[in-house]
Amino acid sequence: MPAGAAMKIIVNNKVHLSEFRSSDKPALIQHLNDRDIYDRTLRIPFPYTEKDADHWLALVAKIAEQQGRPVHFAIRSADDALIGACGFSDFQLGKSHRAEMGYWLGKPFWGRGIMTAVVGRLCQLAFEEFGLVKILAHVHPHNSASARVLEKCGFQQEGYLRQHFLKDGTLIDAKLFGLLK
């Protein structure tokens, strides 16, 4: 890709992945000010503020610089609007054999097969370009839609982690899913 060229990873004719842009801030705030998304994720604050969006955009830029390339991606509709996000954590590009995947999708886009397509494409990218041999994902026990996305993409539930995460002062369980190359 030529220097300065915008990255575009085609998922299908409806969505693609790209780097985050500063212009994504209003869409981040709009989509993430949703209690249902907050209840299904671990690291997204609620209410989601302008400060949270600034912090996220700075963080993904810093991580991309540290990794030498983006590892968090904006999910965009055919008209290039931000509708969600996905990416990897807990790994070092070129040195780690596994990473954890996380994702969210704006509520108006739920139930359309978008996230299943995105997760499938993201796993392909991770295996081919990041050199990973295993991808992990944690899912809240009540988030059956996310578990179905992972299962459709070939993930298997590897465990049930009791009181594994602390959120809002409450210990919560998690289902652990894994996918091998």
Image (cartoon, rainbow, N blue to C red):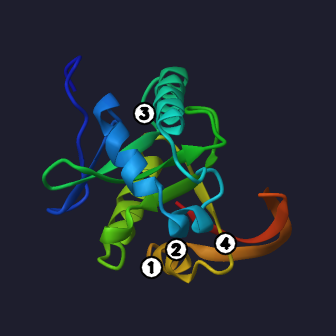
Q: Amino acid at mark 1?
A: Lys
Residue indicated by mark 3: 70
92 lies left or right of 1: right
Under circle 2, the secondary element is helix
Q: Which residue is mark 4?
A: 140
Q: CA distance from mark 2 to mark 4?
A: 9 Å
Query: How far is the residue under mark 1 from the one under mark 4?
Result: 17 Å
Given residues 167 and 84, the one toward you in this image is: 167
- Nearer to me, 62 or 82: 82
Hey, what amino acid is under mark 3? Pro
Residue 105's disc is: none
- Residue 156, compared with residue 47, is above or below; it is below
User: Dot 1 lies on which element?
Assistant: helix
Vertical comparison of 4 with 72: above or below: above
Q: CA distance from mark 1 to mark 3?
A: 25 Å
The circle on residue 152 is 1
